[in-house]
Image (cartoon, rainbow, N blue to C red):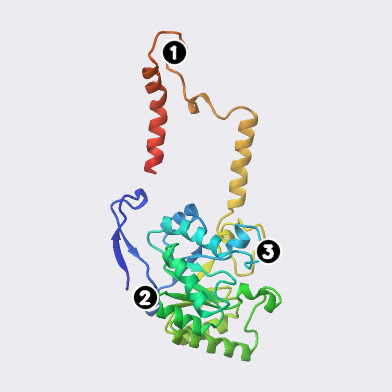
Amino acid sequence: MSLSNFSAGADPAHSGSQLTKVTMPALADMKRQGKPISALTAYDYATARVVDEAGIDLMLVGDSLAMVVLGHENTLAVTMDEMLHHTRAVRRAVRRALVVADMPFGSYHGSTEAGVANAIRFIKEAGAEAVKVEGPRTELVRALVEAEIPVVCHLGLTPQSVHRMGGFRVQARTADAARRLRADARALERAGAGAIVLEGIPREAAAAITAELQIPTIGIGAGPDCDGQILVFHDLVNLSFAPAAKFVRRYADAATLFRSAIEHYREDVEHRTFPSDRESYHLPAEVREGRPMSAEDADAVVNNDALQDFGEFSRS
């Protein structure tokens, strides 16, 4: 496979290990070998670190952060600066997964030159290893590839087209529409796309496209026949605060877990059981008992525990 090996360095989560970095060519190798591609969204350092350590192959800094992180009703409001900010946070955490950044609405819908310039910012300023664009934009894909920027494309239900589509509706529902979608996928492959996300289309249409292309397809609401699957992290763990779509499988209930932990914390604060004496710093016994002790010695004793704490924190 087209993978790069590198040392994990001082990262304690991977200390002493060799990691196999996923690259865009590696995804094509995975398709040829029949190895399914796992993909998931992430939007911050902590989430990205957990996702990467779990072995996910492709991490998408999705414009879905507009909804699940920023609270907007669709993806259209998120800006370039916001996407760059979140991509930088994710990239700092990732050692193995391929980091793909969603180009937000308006960042590539004008001239091809403007689209390339914005894509370069994701690579140069945020550390993304590929960008994702929605729709059959073959001219833009060719220009991005010419600029040495790997591209993931997105067909079917494209959330940035929500107004044109009249809502989040399943696409390619007729034979003609499915044929057009297949033609678009072939054109994007010829233009140089490295992979294609297929969202919200019938399983049969996705299976036909997957069988026809040499590049991998990654499905979300497109059935099990794609070369890989992607979900929104917040949907996976029930943090989206919205009814789950048909294609979403919830693997955990983080909302209940977090809420319970926070309620217990609040109760402990209200009952003055947190913090306990063991969770507090103390004056030295000499100072408490009124015995003579220099300020320097007292400071050293008081800060000994704190220095140990902060030392552990700095190594984590």
Instruction: Say which mark, if any, is on residue 229.
Output: none
Alpha carbons under labels 2 and 1: distance apart? 66 Å
Q: Give, as a three-letter code, the residue at label 2.
A: Pro
Marks 2 and 3, the one that precedes in the sequence: 2
Residue receiving disc 3: 73
Q: What element carries label 2?
A: helix
Judge depth for marks 2 and 1 and give the one in front.
1
Marks 3 and 1, the one that precedes in the sequence: 3
**150 over 310 or under it: above or below:** below
Question: Which of the 4 quarters of the picture holds residue 159?
Answer: bottom right
Q: x and y percent of residue 143 in the render?
A: 45, 81
Q: Do the residues labelled 2 and 1 touch (CB within 8 Å)?
A: no
Question: Is any part of residue 6 visible from this angle?
Answer: yes
Residue receiving disc 1: 287
Horizontal placement of 155 versus 214: left or right?
Answer: right
Q: Are marks 3 and 1 in contact (CB under 8 Å)?
A: no
Q: Is mark 3 on a helix, strand or loop?
A: loop
Q: 10 Å neighbourhood of mark 1: few (<14), some, or many (≥20)?
A: some
Residue receiving disc 2: 25
Q: Is mark 1 on a helix, strand or loop?
A: helix
The quadrant of the image that shows the C terminus is top left
Marks 2 and 1, the one that precedes in the sequence: 2
Give the camera-side residue of 197 and 201.
197
Give the camera-side residue of 252 and 216.
216
